[in-house]
Image (cartoon, rainbow, N blue to C red):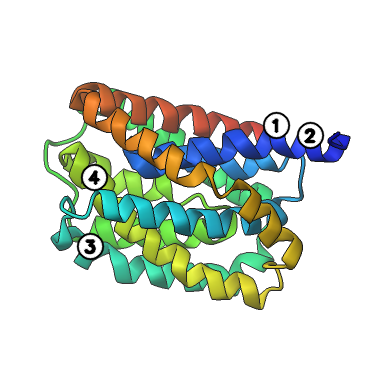
């Protein structure tokens, strides 16, 4: 029989991993933002992030393989190095920032971005975001990704208005976050978070990774592009509200 603490872990961790896998499969990396807050209901947030990190790497591997023929390398050239820099910046300064402030910042950015997408056509031009926007938002994405694996919304601010085909959006973001999570692995190890206990928790959840990524890829291939983007924006908006609510 499961102990209450173990039961609460299953109730929060299993859906968190499945939702993250759906995002990695192409439903939008913003979905992964829900994982750490959800698991934090039964675990300390830092431990939750540490347990998730090896699983994210496995999911990234499956996603990269699945979308290997749908990667926009011209975009990768713009966002990868700034993203890696942002990750290293997060390692250096994250300890001085409260998790609440990070959650609040990303939640607010997510909500404003969605409102801009839904209402901003009354005010903005039809031009796509340029290279400077890509460098800026990928740096922010790398920074916020380090602490609570929440790099999806900042990068989405740059990526979604490009209106890529849904397969190329999924493949390009898989390469980006795969590289970031690979860099985070030794960083988390240096912080003493990749303990035997946490790795055992990760191993227990590991079978969910390929299944959830596969499910996400299947959904992307069967959902229309218009509906796909509507789902992304709605999920991003809900996530932003959730993060802001956590700060109250």
Q: Can residue 28 be seen by looking at this rendering?
A: no
Q: Which residue is mark 4?
A: 169
In three-dimensional space, the C-alpha distance between marks 1 and 2, rounded to whole angstroms, equals 6 Å
Does the CB distance between marks 4 and 1 fall below 8 Å?
no
Give the mark, 3 or 1, whose residue is nearer the N terminus: 1
Q: Which residue is mark 1?
A: 11
Q: Which is nearer the eye, 21 or 42? A: 21
Q: Which residue is mark 2?
A: 7
Give the mark, 4 or 1, whose residue is nearer the N terminus: 1
In three-dimensional space, the C-alpha distance between marks 4 and 2, rounded to whole angstroms, equals 36 Å
Q: Which is nearer the eye, 72 or 98? A: 72
Percent coordinates x, y for residue 241 in the rendering: 55, 29
Dot 2 alpha-carbon crowd within 10 angstroms: few under 14, some 14 to 19, many 20 or more:
few
Give the mark, 2 or 3, whose residue is nearer the N terminus: 2
Percent coordinates x, y for residue 194 in the rendering: 67, 67
Residue at 76% x, 46% y is: 43
Give the mark, 4 or 2, whose residue is nearer the N terminus: 2
In three-dimensional space, the C-alpha distance between marks 3 and 1, rounded to whole angstroms, equals 36 Å
Percent coordinates x, y for residue 248 in the rendering: 71, 34
Measured along the vertical axis of the image, is residue 89 above or below residue 50? below
Element marked by disc 3 = helix
Q: Which is nearer the eye, 198 or 172? A: 198
Does the CB distance between marks 1 and 2 fall below 8 Å?
yes
Q: Which is nearer the eye, 89 or 1? A: 1
Q: Which residue is mark 3?
A: 76
Of badges 4 and 1, nearer the viewer stands 1
173 relative position to 235: left or right: left
């Amino acid at each position: 029989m499961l102990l209450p603490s173990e039961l609460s872990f299953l109730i929060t961790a299993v859906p968190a991993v499945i939702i993250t896998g759906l995002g990695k499969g192409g439903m939008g990396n913003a979905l992964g933002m829900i994982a750490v807050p959800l698991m934090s209901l039964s675990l300390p947030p830092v431990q939750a992030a540490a347990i998730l990190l090896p699983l994210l790497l496995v999911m990234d591997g499956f996603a990269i393989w699945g979308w290997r023929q749908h990667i926009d390398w011209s975009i990768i050239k713009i966002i990868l190095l700034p993203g890696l820099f942002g990750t290293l910046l997060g390692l250096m300064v994250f300890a001085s920032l409260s998790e609440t402030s990070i959650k609040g910042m990303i939640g607010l950015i997510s909500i404003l971005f969605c409102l801009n997408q839904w209402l901003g056509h009354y005010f903005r031009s039809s031009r796509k975001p340029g290279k400077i926007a890509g460098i800026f938002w990928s740096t922010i994405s790398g920074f916020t990704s380090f602490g609570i694996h929440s790099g999806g919304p900042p990068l989405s601010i740059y990526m979604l208005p490009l209106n890529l085909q849904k397969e190329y959006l999924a493949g390009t973001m898989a390469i980006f976050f795969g590289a970031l999570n690979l860099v985070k692995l030794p960083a988390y190890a240096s912080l003493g978070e990749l303990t035997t206990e946490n790795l055992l928790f990760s191993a227990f959840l590991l079978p969910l990774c390929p299944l959830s990524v596969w499910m996400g890829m299947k959904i992307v291939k069967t959902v229309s592009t218009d509906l796909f983007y509507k789902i992304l924006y709605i999920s991003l908006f809900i996530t932003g509200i959730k993060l802001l609510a956590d700060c109250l």
